[in-house]
Image: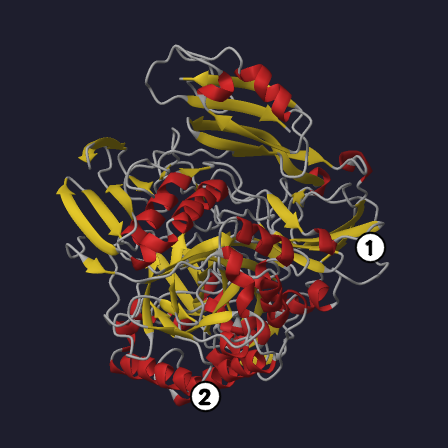
Amino acid sequence: MAHPKSFTYSLCFFLSVILCSFVASATDVSYDGRAITIDGKRRILQSGSIHYPRSTPQMWPDLIRKSKEGGLDAIETYVFWNAHEPVRREYDFTGNLDLVRFLKTVQEEGLYAVLRIGPYVCAEWNYGGLPVWLHNLPNCQIRTANDVFMNEMKNFTTLIVDMMKKEKLFASQGGPIIIAQIENEYGNVESYYGDAGKAYINWCANFAESLNIGVPWIMCQQKDAPASMINTCNGWYCDTFKPSNPNTPKMWTENWTGWFKSWGGLDPLRTAEDVAFAVARFFQYGGTFQNYYMYHGGTNFDRTAASYITTSYDYDAPLDEYGHLNQPKWGHLKELHEVLKSMEHVLTYGNITTTELGNSLSTTVFATNESSGCIFGNANNSVDATITFQGKTHTIPAWSVSILPDCKEEAYNTAKVNTQTTIKVKSVNKAEDELQSLQWSWRPEKIHTELLGKGEVVANRLMEQKEAANDASDYLWYMTSVQISKDDPVLIGNMTLRINETGYILHAYVNGEHVGSQWAKYNVFNYVFEKPITLVPGVNTISLLSATVGFPNYGGGFEDIKTGIVGPVELVGQSGDETVIKNLSERKWSYKVGLHGMKDQLFSSASRKWSVEGLPVNRTMTWYKTTFKAPLGTEPVVVDLQGLGKGNAWVNGHSIGRYWPSYLAQTDGCSLQACDYRGTYDNNKCVFNCGKPTQRWYHIPRSFLQDDENTLVLFEEFGGNPSYVNFQTIRVGTICANAYENHTLKLACQGRPISAIKFASFGNPEGTCGSFRKGTCDSTTALSILQKECVGKESCSIDVSESMFGYTTCGDIMKRLAVEAVC
């Protein structure tokens, strides 16, 4: 993409030092075709997504503070309709659903907020954030021009807006919210809904405008956004994006810093170099606002994850699932933000001249009468480029962007990482020796009532699971009885039970005996279950337990994807070439939602009806309970559930989500070498963890723990061994860096002192973290200087230069400092 050769681009960066100025009085927020304008000044904003339900209120101040330290100006969040209105007209804004408290915490830290009300959010969240009860409203069709749906959406959105107004949280009232969003990525699916989709998006815009919130509205991925809306971009790269309305600014609402994980999927990694490249290119080509999705991912507590999405939502974000800095990504982006802000005046008021040099190489000059700044881009994915600009030679590595605040000296290059890399380690719980001290009790999940066929709802058909269970539980029993006479043709020989299932998990019982279980794979949810059974003359009971692992969340018509046992359900008799099929689909079926243990709240009750004798292992449908002491210190806590099958876990009554360590990640497709940041990224490019548990470690927020005794309760669905369960903490163990000359390197152990320097070399060191080695030239003082400056301190800053480390024999090459330190 090429800019016009020269044009005036007047924008104003939003500096962190003035962030608090807007909270005392009303702030005028608008846009003028170039940028978001705040109190008469055009501003460029760096933002990051943090979803309040995926963390706890106790974590919010630290997460938001670290976001600000990383150079962000705003925090972006979705609003989760199904979490706040789980039952129609019954609302919940308590605990980690306290949206007002979250936004006030953002404001207290001096940051703006972007509120993506939606209220459809996608977000790898159950049913895309829509409440499942919508599915069961008569004549309701979701996300289209349907009066029933639009009335419900209007009710919830108005509720949120009125709540924000009451608390004076819009910038027009002196609050932090400078931008709001209506709907979400609808342009990706609009064609599915046809003319009704177009009518719906126009209705959304008119409705949003009628709410008079005093700040701009956005619609992401909406090329045909009405004139009153700002169309924005989501994706890995948005430098070539142009808003459909030339009178609106160029905004990037989702810069994907990583990717989510599915059960059976691999661990994705997006390098710091590539994320920085995408950001720098975006601003080189006229960007105004960019938001990291995610800046902190967090945890899918309880049943909030969408279909087959893991409990961890770490997302390889700059702040990891536990709130630690994910280095080098956090630090590399922080340095990018700093250098961009150092160019505030020239970037926002300068004339812009972009020259395309061929072979994906470009130069952009931002010039005022007083000064100029430059951004050079090389989008070639393999060839470094050398250019001469204003009489000086510059080398731009492949797939990188160089930023020169004075058009003379490079201050930042996206491919040159000068921040530390942290390697985290897990430590055993020093409060007690778990492997020896955890004492387990257990209870079976009662299933005898279901086997009698007594349920809460009866129908002469197979009901879809959203219809019958209304998202009250993952689990739904389908039960029927069959009268078989001695001469029934189906008894001709071998017999099987055959079921078409989309549940995604099925456990089948015939006459009280478990005959088999089966489950789907991610994105392939339809399958046929067929197992041998034995029926007897007379009455036979068939009880089928269907289990979902979250509902679909994305795509045109995702709300209509069937879940549960859709049928047919058949008895198949086979003798030689003769086959007899008895279809049970339209018989009288009885339905029961949930499990006894969950209805009895075994995860939080003080019931004494737990057995301590004969602890069973590898037993399906079993409850386990133990007590433990909270790990010492303040470091994040995880529980290791390797050895278990699949189920749900609670700590002191708090759900920490679904677990499934027995689901191993696929065995092929892993990256065998370190990721090459060069070239277009997608979520299949750099992936790891082949053949290992998709997720073994599960986050327990410190706020869930008590000082004395804590209780862990597991519902084990598939069968496993709780004896291996143990609690550990996560901390930074090793820090490494490979910083370039003429930069300042900061080393930090994130709350712990640096205990030793294992390696240090200034010159042309080789290797990677854990296997550094000296190159052909080296300063002899590097190790002793690092030991003196850093050991015993939580952090230290080192000037990477010959003036610090002394002369080397490296000549004119760009020298580097390689360090490996122990925390």
The C terminus - image quarter: top right
Residue appearing at x 32%, y 18% in the figure:
812
Left or right position of 683 against 589: left
Pick the residue in front: 343 or 702.
343
Residue appearing at x 16%, y 47% in the figure:
355
Secondary-structure class at tag 2:
helix
Q: Is residue 460 visible?
A: no
* Vertical side of 157 occupied by 720: above or below: above
Residue appearing at x 68%, y 52% in the figure:
701
Please identify the quarter of the rendering in which residue 407 is found.
top left
Pick the residue in front: 461 or 644.
644
Residue 539 in percent (x, y) is at 60, 70
Inspect the image, locate mark 1, and give the three-letter code of the amino acid beneath it.
Trp
Left or right position of 697 against 326: right
Q: Disc 1 or disc 2, which is closer to the eye?
A: 2
Residue 759 in percent (x, y) is at 54, 18
Inspect the image, locate mark 2, and give the three-letter code of the amino acid beneath it.
Asn
Disc ID at residue 610: 1
Left or right position of 568 against 24: left
Secondary-structure class at tag 1:
loop
Q: Is residue 492 visible?
A: yes
Disc ID at residue 151: 2
Residue 357 in percent (x, y) is at 14, 42
Q: CA distance from mark 1 to mark 2?
A: 48 Å
Mark 1 and mark 2 lie on one chain; the one further toward the N terminus is: 2
Disc ID at residue 192: none
Pick the residue in front: 282 or 649.
282
For disc 2, the neighbor class at 10 Å (few under 14, some 14 to 19, many from 20) is few
